[in-house]
Image (cartoon, rainbow, N blue to C red):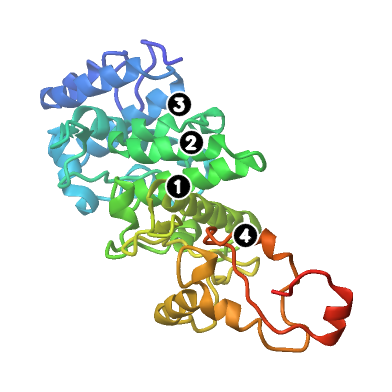
Amino acid sequence: MASPRSTIRGTNLNFDPEFRFLLVLDPALEGWRALAAEWWLTQKATRNRATAVVTFFVRYLHALQLDTRPITLFEAGSGLPDLWKTLNQVPLQEASQKIQYDTISDFLDWVLRTELAEPDSEGYRVVPTHLKHPFPRIRLKQVGKISDLSFTYVTERDPRMGHWQALAAEWLGAQKTAVHLRRNALDCFLIDYLVGCELPHHPIEFLKRSTPKPNFSEVLVKRKTYGAVGQLAAGEIKHNNYAADFLDWVLVEKLSIDDEYGHRAILPNLHNPIARLSTSGLATPTETVKAALSIRYIKELRMLLAEGPNFRDWGWAQQVTDGGTSGGDWFVVDPKLINRNDPDCVWRERNSTLYEQKNSSCRLV
């Protein structure tokens, strides 16, 4: 834990949890001081965490004489001086260096999402579009997501993700095998893809064919932190395919309608944008590659086979059984068994053969 008597590197000042030492450097840093003190109350106080944030204030903001208003940092975005080169003058390689960088990034992310977010038209607090995080994290952040099967952290990250969060929790709750792999796949889809690529927050809008969407597998490649560069590993291919399974479920179970024949049909303007991949990483077709039979011919054939609601209406189907030497599926019955009022009862009359006359006591029909 950072002690109040700890001397701040590069100054003769002591650290305190209220960050009042910043005002000694420059009274105009009051805005940052108040934010840092509030953020510090939400954190587990450690020397490394204190060192990282103080380094940002002293050796970046103050040393470069940048605008001291917090909002200007996020308005400038990528136009700011490189953070790591300013602090270290060496390539970003060591694990401890990455931890320090990511701690600063987490602090700025907290400021952006907690203090600078504004209510949108639906009442959600969201980051205004003209503000951008200037120094995104280098490493993936671990937030105890493995045990969170309801994906509550997703709405904490972006309150507008409520629809996706509910769908993901329901789908995962119905899975019986490879639950942890499926959860990881949904995490990639929800956080890295939907939130990270700023895609539509409502499932219907996202699944519209007209909505531009990046390739999901390419997003998986970009987020890789180990393994072959530019190539998906077997586990990442599974993530891709599990995400495709999830979207298939959303389309069929939540966004389909009953057609005129009682079958579930997906609306034609919606689709699953994630193509399933083979173990080689190549896309596998989700539908037959053969030419589809025109729907007109399918309807004509259906009307030919089933010409009406009752079997008695199926004249063509009955006629085709008349050919051949065996007489089709017609069989001899006693005329008393024929129910002429039953629309599904069909019979025919023909002349009996000599053999039938000798061996049958009933009239042939």
Q: Check disc 3 and give the amino acid type.
A: Asn
Looking at marks 2 and 1 on the same chain, the residue that comes earlier in the sequence is marked by: 2
| Residue that numbered label 2 is attached to | 170
Task: Determine whether label 3 and label 4 are within 8 Å by CB.
Answer: no
| Residue that numbered label 1 is attached to | 253
Q: Residue at x 56, y 28 (%)?
A: 147
* Image: 113 above or below 5: below
* SS for dot 2: helix
* SS for dot 1: helix
**Location of residue 86 in the rendering, given as x and y in whole percent from the top left corner:** 31, 46
Looking at marks 2 and 3 on the same chain, the residue that comes earlier in the sequence is marked by: 3
Q: Is residue 136 left or right of residue 239?
A: left
How crowded pointer 2 is (Cα within 10 Å; few <14, some 14-19, many 20+) is rated as few
> Quadrant of the rendered structure where residue 44 is?
top left
In this view of the protein, which residue sits in the foreground, 68 or 269? 269
Tag of residue 48: 3
Label 4 to label 2: alpha-carbon separation? 28 Å
| Residue that numbered label 4 is attached to | 233
In this view of the protein, which residue sits in the foreground, 344 or 332? 332
Tell us which disc is closer to us: 4 or 2: 2
Tell us which disc is closer to us: 3 or 4: 4
Tell us which disc is closer to us: 1 or 4: 1
State whether residue 286 appears in this view.
Answer: no
How crowded pointer 3 is (Cα within 10 Å; few <14, some 14-19, many 20+) is rated as some
> Quadrant of the rendered structure where residue 39 is?
top left
- In the image, farthest residue toward the bottom: 324
**Location of residue 296 in the rendering, given as x and y in whole percent from the top left corner:** 39, 80
Q: Is residue 145 left or right of residue 136?
A: right
How crowded pointer 4 is (Cα within 10 Å; few <14, some 14-19, many 20+) is rated as some
Looking at marks 1 and 4 on the same chain, the residue that comes earlier in the sequence is marked by: 4
Q: Check disc 4 and give the amino acid type.
A: Ala
